[in-house]
Amino acid sequence: MMEFHIPADGNKKLEALMSLVKKDKEIETLLKMSNITAIDRMGYNDHGPTHVRIVANSSLRILRILMKHKIVPDVVKNYKFKKEDAEIIVVFSAILHDIGHAIHRKNHEFLSTILAGPIIDRILDSLYKDQEKNIIKLEILHTIYSHEPNMDPLTIEGGVMKVADALDMEMGRARIPYQAGSVNIHSMSAMAIEKVKIFEGIKRPIRIIIYMSDSAGIFQVDELLKGKVKTSGIAKELEIDAILKQGKKEKILKKFQF
């Protein structure tokens, strides 16, 4: 059984979803294979179980803060679903968004939607009926398809998961390829990121602080995070600080507001 710790906070559908996901062998196999492609074959960073757990939790945290600030998810606005259903969309899309790596990294977001379709049908079958299931399924597929920088999501949920995906940049994500001898700008910069924290902001709903031990970590922000934030559709809701930690001293390297 896979380990997933997702705070349901009273969302019974989310509890049921995670109970099914944890024991699903197909999802487990696809996540394992995604890491084989990303790490073993390409020397890239983690795209497997640990990555999707982090993205799922970050997605849920960002969405809940936005909803607290009266920002309405599109599945609620367009289809009169509940906020709990928006949580299903961001969490399940986070879990499935990288499974296309099991086939290839190139166009993996498209490949992920192909592999995810039957899985979503099977898992959601006990949670939703007929038309409702189809709507949630397609919203999940939209969110998966939109998570790369070159694609603009058309929903709040899509933007949330896209930002959460980019925020998984802490050093642990690069540790396996780095220790295996894959030393490149991706692994070096990721090793410089000590911590990423998501807070409820003051000027904007979401405040993100990225702590790094070396200025090499700014590559993660400039080349990976910034591109996804700019095309997320929720950039105006975020403020981002990149902070260099040297001993007890902290220095703001960059501040981002879009």
Image: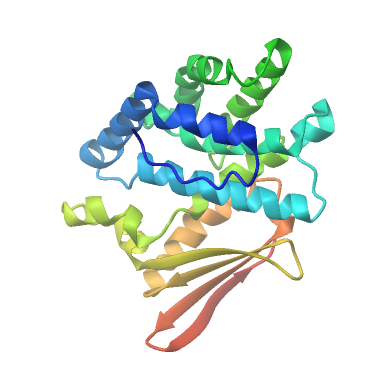
Q: How many marks?
A: 0
**Residue shown at 46% from the left, 49% from the top:** 54
Q: Is 186 or 37 nearer to us in this picture?
A: 37
Q: x%, y% of residue 128?
A: 66, 19
Residue appearing at x 49%, y 64% in the figure: 196
23 relative to 238 in the view: left or right: left
Q: Residue furthest top?
A: 130
Q: Residue 81: x, y in percent?
A: 78, 29
Which corner quadrant of the image does residue 194 belong to?
Answer: bottom left
Can you say whether 213 is above or below 94 in the image? Answer: below
Can residue 43 be seen here?
A: yes
Q: Residue at x 41, y 32 (%)?
A: 22
Q: Quarter holding the C terminus?
A: bottom right
* Position of 219 relative to 126 (above/below): below
Q: To which quarter of the image does residue 25 belong? A: top left
151 on left or right of 73:
left
Q: At 60% from the left edge and 47% from the top edge, which residue is drawn?
A: 60
Color style of the picture: rainbow
Task: Decide which of 87, 39 is in the foreground and name it.
Answer: 87
Residue 235: quadrant of the picture: bottom right
**Residue 29 percent location from the top left of the image:** 31, 26
Would residue 163 be visible to someone looking at this image? no
Question: Is 59 located above or below residue 98 in the figure?
Answer: below
**Residue 206: image x %, image y %?**
68, 61
Q: Which quadrant, please, contains the N terminus?
A: top left
Q: Nearer the viewer, residue 49 or 208?
A: 49
Q: Is residue 125 above or below residue 244?
A: above
